[in-house]
Every structure is written in C-alpha cells, then in structure tokens.
Amino acid sequence: MKVRVDLSLCQSHGQCALAADQVFRLDDELNLHYNPEPPDEFRAAVEEAALMCPTQAITVDREV
Ligand code: SF4
C-alpha cells in the first residue's frame, strides 16, 4: 500500500502516530516521519490514522 502525507497540511498533532506508530512518528522537533510504502498488515491502522488526522493530510492509495 502507498501512503502520502501532505506536510503542508500536517500540524504535528500526532494522532497518526497514536493510531499507527509502526508507520508514523514525530521526532523531538515534531517533524513527521512516515513509511510511504508500509506492508498491507498495517492497512487498518493507517486508515484509522487517516481518519483521525484533524487536517486530513493523509492519503491512502487503495490497491484493488
Ligand atoms: S495526524 Fe495529521 S496533522 Fe497530525 S501529525 Fe499526523 S499527519 Fe500531521
């Protein structure tokens, strides 16, 4: 699966890291780091993160 975060929208709230800490992480300066191609086993957590993001900065590509 592919994940994209629009960092111009990200306000470092960290909800994504709470929902899917395997994929999203905030560093000490509150910069977001993430895995843009996480394994499918994290799909549910990533979709939860996308829903929780208050600025809707996270896009998840669905593979059919
Ligand atoms: S939840 Fe959204 S705004 Fe918050 S750190 Fe994650 S991507 Fe950024």
Image (cartoon, rainbow, N blue to C red):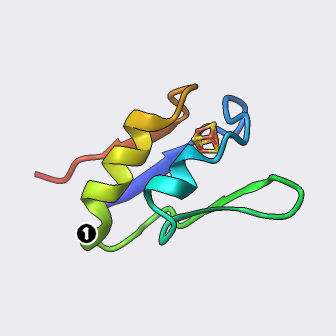
Give how far across and how far down residue 11 sits, in percent.
73, 34
Residue 27, above or below 57? below
Quarter containing ligand 1?
Answer: top right
Give how far across and how far down residue 59 sits, in percent.
43, 39
Q: Secondary structure at mark 1?
A: helix
Residue 38, above or below 4? below
Residue 12, above or below 45? above
The count of marks equals 1
**Quarter of the image where the N terminus is located:** bottom left
Give how far across and how far down residue 55 sits, in percent.
58, 25
Give how far across and how far down residue 25 sits, in percent.
64, 63
The foreground one among 39 and 55 is 55
Residue 14, above or below 55? below
Q: Which residue is mark 1?
A: 40
- Residue at the outermost front position: 18
Q: Does label 1 point to a residue whose CB lies under 8 Å from ligand 1?
A: no
Q: Residues within 10 Å of mark 1 (few under 14, many from 20)?
A: few
Q: Is residue 34 left or right of residue 33?
A: left
Residue at the spot 25% in from the left edge and 56% down from the top edge? 44
Question: Amino acid under label 1?
Answer: Asp
